Amino acid sequence: MSASRRQFLNAGAAVGAATVAACASPGSSVASGPKLMFGQSPVTVPIVGRDEQFQVRRIYCVGRNYAAHAREMGSDPTREPPFFFQKPTDAIQVVPPGVTVDHPYPPITKNYHYEIELVACLAKGGRNVAADKALEMVYGYAAGLDMTRRDLQRAMGDQKKPWEVGKSFDKSAVITHIHPATMTGHLAKGAIWLKVNGNVKQNANLNQMTWNVAEQIANLSTFYELFPGDIIYSGTPENVGPVVRGDVMTGHVDGIYDLSVKVV
Ligand code: MN
Protein backbone atom coordinates (compact mmCIF):
# COMPACT_ATOMS: atom_id res chain seq x y z
CA MET A 1 0.00 0.00 0.00
CA SER A 2 1.34 3.42 -0.86
CA ALA A 3 1.95 5.99 1.86
CA SER A 4 -0.64 8.34 0.43
CA ARG A 5 -3.22 5.54 0.24
CA ARG A 6 -2.55 4.55 3.85
CA GLN A 7 -2.75 8.18 4.93
CA PHE A 8 -6.10 8.51 3.14
CA LEU A 9 -7.52 5.40 4.84
CA ASN A 10 -6.33 6.49 8.26
CA ALA A 11 -7.90 9.89 7.79
CA GLY A 12 -11.14 8.24 6.71
CA ALA A 13 -11.15 6.01 9.78
CA ALA A 14 -10.66 8.99 12.06
CA VAL A 15 -13.48 10.92 10.42
CA GLY A 16 -15.70 7.85 10.61
CA ALA A 17 -15.02 7.32 14.29
CA ALA A 18 -15.73 10.96 15.06
CA THR A 19 -19.00 10.89 13.15
CA VAL A 20 -20.17 7.69 14.82
CA ALA A 21 -19.34 9.13 18.23
CA ALA A 22 -21.34 12.25 17.42
CA CYS A 23 -24.34 10.31 16.11
CA ALA A 24 -24.44 7.43 18.57
CA SER A 25 -27.50 7.60 20.73
CA PRO A 26 -28.46 5.59 23.80
CA GLY A 27 -29.96 2.30 22.79
CA SER A 28 -28.54 2.45 19.29
CA SER A 29 -27.51 -0.99 18.11
CA VAL A 30 -24.88 0.59 15.86
CA ALA A 31 -22.62 2.01 18.53
CA SER A 32 -19.45 1.77 16.49
CA GLY A 33 -18.27 0.90 13.03
CA PRO A 34 -17.30 2.51 9.79
CA LYS A 35 -18.94 5.67 8.54
CA LEU A 36 -21.72 4.74 6.14
CA MET A 37 -22.39 6.39 2.81
CA PHE A 38 -25.87 7.52 1.70
CA GLY A 39 -27.52 7.70 5.12
CA GLN A 40 -30.19 5.14 4.30
CA SER A 41 -32.79 4.69 6.99
CA PRO A 42 -33.96 1.31 8.21
CA VAL A 43 -37.31 0.20 6.85
CA THR A 44 -39.77 0.22 9.70
CA VAL A 45 -43.45 -0.44 10.36
CA PRO A 46 -45.25 1.12 13.35
CA ILE A 47 -46.69 -1.16 16.02
CA VAL A 48 -50.24 -0.59 17.22
CA GLY A 49 -50.29 0.72 20.78
CA ARG A 50 -46.54 1.06 21.16
CA ASP A 51 -43.98 3.73 20.39
CA GLU A 52 -41.43 1.18 19.12
CA GLN A 53 -41.11 0.54 15.42
CA PHE A 54 -40.72 -2.91 13.86
CA GLN A 55 -37.58 -2.93 11.72
CA VAL A 56 -38.09 -5.09 8.65
CA ARG A 57 -35.20 -7.41 7.80
CA ARG A 58 -36.57 -9.56 4.98
CA ILE A 59 -39.91 -9.84 3.24
CA TYR A 60 -40.84 -13.41 2.40
CA CYS A 61 -43.98 -14.26 0.45
CA VAL A 62 -45.75 -17.60 0.15
CA GLY A 63 -47.08 -18.56 -3.26
CA ARG A 64 -50.41 -20.26 -3.97
CA ASN A 65 -51.41 -20.93 -0.38
CA TYR A 66 -55.18 -21.07 -0.83
CA ALA A 67 -56.43 -24.00 -2.90
CA ALA A 68 -58.88 -22.00 -4.97
CA HIS A 69 -56.20 -19.41 -5.81
CA ALA A 70 -53.76 -22.17 -6.76
CA ARG A 71 -56.40 -23.51 -9.16
CA GLU A 72 -57.05 -20.09 -10.69
CA MET A 73 -53.29 -19.75 -11.26
CA GLY A 74 -53.29 -23.07 -13.08
CA SER A 75 -51.73 -25.45 -10.57
CA ASP A 76 -52.93 -28.42 -8.55
CA PRO A 77 -53.19 -27.40 -4.89
CA THR A 78 -53.11 -30.98 -3.64
CA ARG A 79 -49.61 -31.70 -4.86
CA GLU A 80 -47.72 -28.49 -4.27
CA PRO A 81 -45.62 -27.89 -1.16
CA PRO A 82 -45.32 -24.25 -0.06
CA PHE A 83 -42.93 -22.15 -2.10
CA PHE A 84 -41.46 -18.78 -1.37
CA PHE A 85 -40.16 -15.64 -2.98
CA GLN A 86 -38.90 -12.35 -1.59
CA LYS A 87 -39.48 -8.68 -2.06
CA PRO A 88 -36.91 -6.02 -1.21
CA THR A 89 -37.54 -4.37 2.14
CA ASP A 90 -37.87 -0.95 0.51
CA ALA A 91 -40.96 -2.27 -1.26
CA ILE A 92 -42.82 -1.59 2.00
CA GLN A 93 -45.64 0.95 1.83
CA VAL A 94 -47.17 1.55 5.26
CA VAL A 95 -50.88 2.36 5.46
CA PRO A 96 -51.89 3.95 8.79
CA PRO A 97 -55.41 3.48 10.21
CA GLY A 98 -58.20 5.75 9.07
CA VAL A 99 -56.54 7.20 5.99
CA THR A 100 -56.41 6.37 2.30
CA VAL A 101 -52.84 6.36 1.04
CA ASP A 102 -51.92 7.10 -2.56
CA HIS A 103 -50.39 4.04 -4.21
CA PRO A 104 -48.56 4.67 -7.49
CA TYR A 105 -49.44 2.53 -10.50
CA PRO A 106 -46.07 0.97 -11.35
CA PRO A 107 -44.29 1.20 -14.70
CA ILE A 108 -44.36 -1.31 -17.57
CA THR A 109 -47.41 -3.35 -16.53
CA LYS A 110 -50.84 -3.29 -18.14
CA ASN A 111 -52.33 -5.82 -15.72
CA TYR A 112 -51.73 -4.73 -12.14
CA HIS A 113 -53.23 -7.10 -9.55
CA TYR A 114 -54.15 -6.98 -5.87
CA GLU A 115 -53.52 -9.88 -3.51
CA ILE A 116 -54.85 -9.39 0.02
CA GLU A 117 -52.78 -11.33 2.55
CA LEU A 118 -52.20 -11.90 6.25
CA VAL A 119 -48.66 -10.86 7.19
CA ALA A 120 -46.86 -12.60 10.07
CA CYS A 121 -44.07 -10.57 11.67
CA LEU A 122 -41.26 -12.37 13.51
CA ALA A 123 -39.50 -11.22 16.66
CA LYS A 124 -37.41 -14.37 16.99
CA GLY A 125 -35.38 -16.37 14.54
CA GLY A 126 -34.26 -19.89 13.98
CA ARG A 127 -33.66 -22.63 11.49
CA ASN A 128 -35.38 -25.97 11.11
CA VAL A 129 -38.08 -24.75 13.46
CA ALA A 130 -40.74 -27.29 14.45
CA ALA A 131 -44.24 -26.24 13.47
CA ASP A 132 -45.45 -26.59 17.05
CA LYS A 133 -42.80 -24.06 18.18
CA ALA A 134 -43.11 -21.69 15.24
CA LEU A 135 -45.80 -19.37 16.56
CA GLU A 136 -43.52 -18.49 19.49
CA MET A 137 -41.47 -16.58 16.90
CA VAL A 138 -44.40 -14.44 15.73
CA TYR A 139 -44.51 -11.00 17.30
CA GLY A 140 -47.67 -9.91 15.58
CA TYR A 141 -49.75 -9.61 12.45
CA ALA A 142 -50.65 -7.11 9.79
CA ALA A 143 -52.82 -7.03 6.72
CA GLY A 144 -50.96 -6.54 3.47
CA LEU A 145 -51.21 -6.38 -0.29
CA ASP A 146 -48.77 -8.42 -2.37
CA MET A 147 -49.16 -6.14 -5.38
CA THR A 148 -48.26 -7.93 -8.60
CA ARG A 149 -47.50 -6.98 -12.18
CA ARG A 150 -49.39 -10.06 -13.35
CA ASP A 151 -48.58 -9.71 -17.02
CA LEU A 152 -44.86 -9.55 -16.28
CA GLN A 153 -45.07 -12.39 -13.76
CA ARG A 154 -46.86 -14.60 -16.29
CA ALA A 155 -44.58 -13.67 -19.18
CA MET A 156 -41.48 -14.47 -17.16
CA GLY A 157 -43.01 -17.71 -15.89
CA ASP A 158 -43.91 -18.76 -19.43
CA GLN A 159 -40.26 -18.30 -20.38
CA LYS A 160 -39.06 -20.12 -17.25
CA LYS A 161 -37.37 -16.93 -16.10
CA PRO A 162 -37.46 -15.52 -12.55
CA TRP A 163 -40.65 -13.73 -11.47
CA GLU A 164 -38.66 -10.86 -10.03
CA VAL A 165 -40.02 -8.00 -12.12
CA GLY A 166 -43.58 -9.19 -11.57
CA LYS A 167 -43.36 -9.24 -7.80
CA SER A 168 -40.45 -7.19 -6.50
CA PHE A 169 -40.76 -3.48 -7.12
CA ASP A 170 -41.30 -0.21 -5.30
CA LYS A 171 -44.29 -0.12 -2.96
CA SER A 172 -45.38 -3.62 -3.94
CA ALA A 173 -45.54 -4.66 -0.26
CA VAL A 174 -48.42 -2.64 1.18
CA ILE A 175 -48.87 -3.19 4.92
CA THR A 176 -50.88 -1.96 7.91
CA HIS A 177 -49.30 -1.23 11.25
CA ILE A 178 -48.40 -4.39 13.13
CA HIS A 179 -50.80 -5.71 15.76
CA PRO A 180 -49.01 -7.58 18.56
CA ALA A 181 -50.21 -11.15 18.98
CA THR A 182 -50.65 -10.30 22.65
CA MET A 183 -53.56 -8.13 21.45
CA THR A 184 -55.00 -10.22 18.64
CA GLY A 185 -54.05 -13.77 19.52
CA HIS A 186 -52.59 -15.88 16.73
CA LEU A 187 -54.71 -15.43 13.64
CA ALA A 188 -55.67 -18.83 12.28
CA LYS A 189 -59.26 -18.18 11.24
CA GLY A 190 -61.39 -15.20 10.39
CA ALA A 191 -62.46 -13.21 7.39
CA ILE A 192 -59.98 -11.94 4.83
CA TRP A 193 -61.40 -9.81 2.04
CA LEU A 194 -60.60 -7.11 -0.47
CA LYS A 195 -62.92 -4.57 -2.03
CA VAL A 196 -62.30 -2.34 -5.01
CA ASN A 197 -64.41 0.82 -5.02
CA GLY A 198 -66.66 -0.80 -2.43
CA ASN A 199 -67.27 -3.99 -4.42
CA VAL A 200 -66.13 -7.28 -2.88
CA LYS A 201 -63.48 -8.94 -5.05
CA GLN A 202 -61.75 -11.41 -2.74
CA ASN A 203 -63.56 -12.99 0.21
CA ALA A 204 -62.26 -15.99 2.12
CA ASN A 205 -61.25 -17.26 5.55
CA LEU A 206 -57.77 -17.57 7.00
CA ASN A 207 -58.58 -21.19 7.87
CA GLN A 208 -58.61 -21.97 4.13
CA MET A 209 -54.83 -21.59 3.89
CA THR A 210 -53.21 -24.74 2.56
CA TRP A 211 -50.25 -24.18 4.90
CA ASN A 212 -50.95 -22.25 8.10
CA VAL A 213 -48.53 -19.67 9.49
CA ALA A 214 -46.78 -22.18 11.77
CA GLU A 215 -46.27 -24.58 8.86
CA GLN A 216 -45.05 -21.74 6.63
CA ILE A 217 -42.43 -20.76 9.20
CA ALA A 218 -41.37 -24.38 9.74
CA ASN A 219 -40.94 -24.95 6.01
CA LEU A 220 -39.33 -21.57 5.29
CA SER A 221 -36.82 -22.13 8.10
CA THR A 222 -35.48 -25.20 6.31
CA PHE A 223 -34.43 -22.97 3.39
CA TYR A 224 -33.26 -19.90 5.33
CA GLU A 225 -32.23 -19.08 8.85
CA LEU A 226 -34.95 -16.72 10.02
CA PHE A 227 -34.23 -13.63 12.09
CA PRO A 228 -36.16 -11.05 14.10
CA GLY A 229 -37.62 -8.53 11.69
CA ASP A 230 -38.44 -11.06 9.00
CA ILE A 231 -42.03 -10.83 7.80
CA ILE A 232 -44.05 -13.35 5.82
CA TYR A 233 -46.87 -12.53 3.40
CA SER A 234 -48.86 -15.72 3.80
CA GLY A 235 -50.55 -15.99 0.43
CA THR A 236 -53.74 -14.70 -1.13
CA PRO A 237 -57.16 -16.25 -1.59
CA GLU A 238 -58.81 -16.68 -4.97
CA ASN A 239 -60.24 -13.99 -7.23
CA VAL A 240 -57.19 -11.84 -7.69
CA GLY A 241 -57.75 -9.18 -10.29
CA PRO A 242 -56.68 -5.88 -11.79
CA VAL A 243 -56.87 -2.29 -10.63
CA VAL A 244 -56.40 0.90 -12.61
CA ARG A 245 -55.64 4.48 -11.64
CA GLY A 246 -58.41 5.96 -9.54
CA ASP A 247 -59.44 2.66 -7.94
CA VAL A 248 -59.63 2.52 -4.15
CA MET A 249 -58.74 -0.81 -2.56
CA THR A 250 -59.95 -1.66 0.93
CA GLY A 251 -58.34 -4.67 2.54
CA HIS A 252 -59.53 -6.51 5.64
CA VAL A 253 -58.29 -9.25 7.92
CA ASP A 254 -60.30 -9.99 11.08
CA GLY A 255 -58.53 -8.52 14.09
CA ILE A 256 -56.68 -5.86 12.09
CA TYR A 257 -57.89 -2.43 10.99
CA ASP A 258 -58.89 -2.08 7.34
CA LEU A 259 -56.23 -0.77 5.00
CA SER A 260 -57.18 1.69 2.28
CA VAL A 261 -55.14 2.75 -0.73
CA LYS A 262 -55.95 4.68 -3.89
CA VAL A 263 -54.15 3.80 -7.10
CA VAL A 264 -52.73 6.97 -8.62
MN1 MN B 1 -49.14 -13.31 -2.92
Image (cartoon, helix red, strand yellow):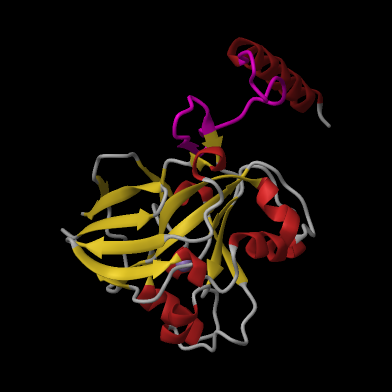
**Picture quadrant of residue 139:** top right
Q: Residue at x 51, y 33 (%)?
A: 41
Q: Position of residue 195 (x, y in %)?
A: 25, 63
Q: Magenta region, mostly helix, strand or loop?
A: loop
With 240 as the anchor, is 8 left or right in this view?
right
Q: The N terminus is located in which quarter?
A: top right
Q: Where does the magenta region start and end?
A: 24-53
With 244 as the anchor, is 87 left or right in this view?
right
Q: Nearer the viewer, residue 103 or 107?
A: 103
Q: Is residue 31 magenta?
A: yes
Q: Residue at x 61, y 29 (%)?
A: 36
With 150 as the anchor, is 31 left or right in this view?
right
Q: Position of residue 68 (x, y in %)?
A: 44, 81
Compared to residue 78, the image places residue 143 above or below, namely above
Q: Position of residue 105 (x, y in %)?
A: 27, 59
Compared to residue 91, the image places residue 5 above or below, namely above
Residue 244: tell me if it is visible. Answer: no
Q: How many marks?
A: 0
**Picture quadrant of residue 250:** bottom left
Q: Position of residue 103 (x, y in %)?
A: 28, 52
Q: Residue at x 79, y 24 (%)?
A: 6
Q: The C terminus is located in which quarter?
A: bottom left
Residue 90: tell me if it is visible. Answer: yes
Q: Is residue 160 magenta?
A: no
